[in-house]
Image (cartoon, grey):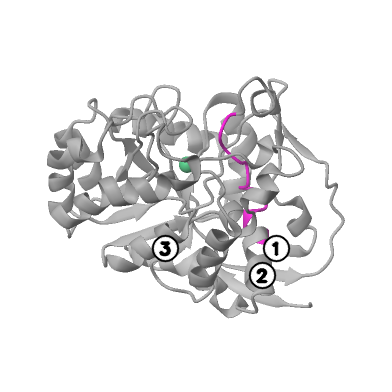
């Protein structure tokens, strides 16, 4: 397979950059490759005010010493009782805040400040709908009675469906869809879109769980069945405008991935683009790759695609497949997608 494709510089519509030494270690991967990056607000202390978001944005830009000329972090606020709608409106109108992120309490890393039911925030969402502020949703039930692999479907049915019925104009992104139920949900609502990760497109739960549990493939929502993976691949490779790349790159040091309790999150900012290119190439749909990584998300959030270009060529490159990312405080992070990356070169043109 010898293939080449030129694309507008892509955007990452869902990324965790962390803070401190981890931010310093990971920022280059995002800032050198992507134009816009939707920055998740779940720091140890959640980003709940415009002032906190501004300061975090400054730390990100300071850490990004080398960056593409048009790299821009787009800031989000964490939906919690701390979030004040007049502060949000001020931040949105000033161009500092792009969206609000809702986490069910306890669903994933640093989500303990999140909500117990999304409908509890309906008054805030009414203000957002009136002002065209997007709501980004981690769509996963935290009900322990519900099977882990059914939790996305349960949340969509039990919480997001009633919200979208009540506020049909609210712009909603179902983040990191992991199931056919997620695909079907998005197709039902004109104002709802989905971000999709490289790992949910390329791995299934057999990869996660056999021959043993692989902590470096553990994320939330959990990677689901092969038929769910296929449903997501089938829709995104058509170029359908409601689906776009959000890497959900979420670095954790190996001491926390392989410790007592594996932290949820996969670091894929480095090679996520190659992983997605490989999927589109395998499906013989490379012509729809620019829509998924560079155009659909931009259109959904009201931007033109980048005018700068990347060239991807499918050719063998030498990579150390055991390489890890090191932080200045002595931590190491597993790099997702090294195998796929060894089949592609990516250059700015
Ligand atoms: Zn995330």
Q: Secondary structure at mark 3?
A: helix
The answer to whether the beta carbon of the residue marked 1 is less than 8 Å from any atom of ligand 1 is no
Q: Looking at the image, is mark 3 or mark 1 earlier in the sequence?
A: 3
Q: Residue 343 location in percent, x, y?
A: 79, 63
318, above or below 91, in the image = below
Question: Whole-percent x and y of residue 311?
Answer: 66, 70
Q: Which secondary structure lies at badge 2?
A: strand
How far apart are the alpha carbons under marks 3 and 1? 29 Å
Give whichever of 328, 161 is nearer the camera: 161
Residue 346: give its label: 1
Q: Which image quadrant is residue 214 in?
A: top right
Pick out the residue farthest to the front: 145
Gap in angstroms between the C-alphas marked 2 and 1: 6 Å
The reply to whether the magenta stretch includes residue 268 is yes
On residue 311, the disc is 2
Checking the image for residue 183, the label placed there is 3
Q: Earlier in the sequence, mark 2 or mark 3?
A: 3
Report the residue at 50% width, 76% height from top. Answer: 238
């Amino acid at each position: 397979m010898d293939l080449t494709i030129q694309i507008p510089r892509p955007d990452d519509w869902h990324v965790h950059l962390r803070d401190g030494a981890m931010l310093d270690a990971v920022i280059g991967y995002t800032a050198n490759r992507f134009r816009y990056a939707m920055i998740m607000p779940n720091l140890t202390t959640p980003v709940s005010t415009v002032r906190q978001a501004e300061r975090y944005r400054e730390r990100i830009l300071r850490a990004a010493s080398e960056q593409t000329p048009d790299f821009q972090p787009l800031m989000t606020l964490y939906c919690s009782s701390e979030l004040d709608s007049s502060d949000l409106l001020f931040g949105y109108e000033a161009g500092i805040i792009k969206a609000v992120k809702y986490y069910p309490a306890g669903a994933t890393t640093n989500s303990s400040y999140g909500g117990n039911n999304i409908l509890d925030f309906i008054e805030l969402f009414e203000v957002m709908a009136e002002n065209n502020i997007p709501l980004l949703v981690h769509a996963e039930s935290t009900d322990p009675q519900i099977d882990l692999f059914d939790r996305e479907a349960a949340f969509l049915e039990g919480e997001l469906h009633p919200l979208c019925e009540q506020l049909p104009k609210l712009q909603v992104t179902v983040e990191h869809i992991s199931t056919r139920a997620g695909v079907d949900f998005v197709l039902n609502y004109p104002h709802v879109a989905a971000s999709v990760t490289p790992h949910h497109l390329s791995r299934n739960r057999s990869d996660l769980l056999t021959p043993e549990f692989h902590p470096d493939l553990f994320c939330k929502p959990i990677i689901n069945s092969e038929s769910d993976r296929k449903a997501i691949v089938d829709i995104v490779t058509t170029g359908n405008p409601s689906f776009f790349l959000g890497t959900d790159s979420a670095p954790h040091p190996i001491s926390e991935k392989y410790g007592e309790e594996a932290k949820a999150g996969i670091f894929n900012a480095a090679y996520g683009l190659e992983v997605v290119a490989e999927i589109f190439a395998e499906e013989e749909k490379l012509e729809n790759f620019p829509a998924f990584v560079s155009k659909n998300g931009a259109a959904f959030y009201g931007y033109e695609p980048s005018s700068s270009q990347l060239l991807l060529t499918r050719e063998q490159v030498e990579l150390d497949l055991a390489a890890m990312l090191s932080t200045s405080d002595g931590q190491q992070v597993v790099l997702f997608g090294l195998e796929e990356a060894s089949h592609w070169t990516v250059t700015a043109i």
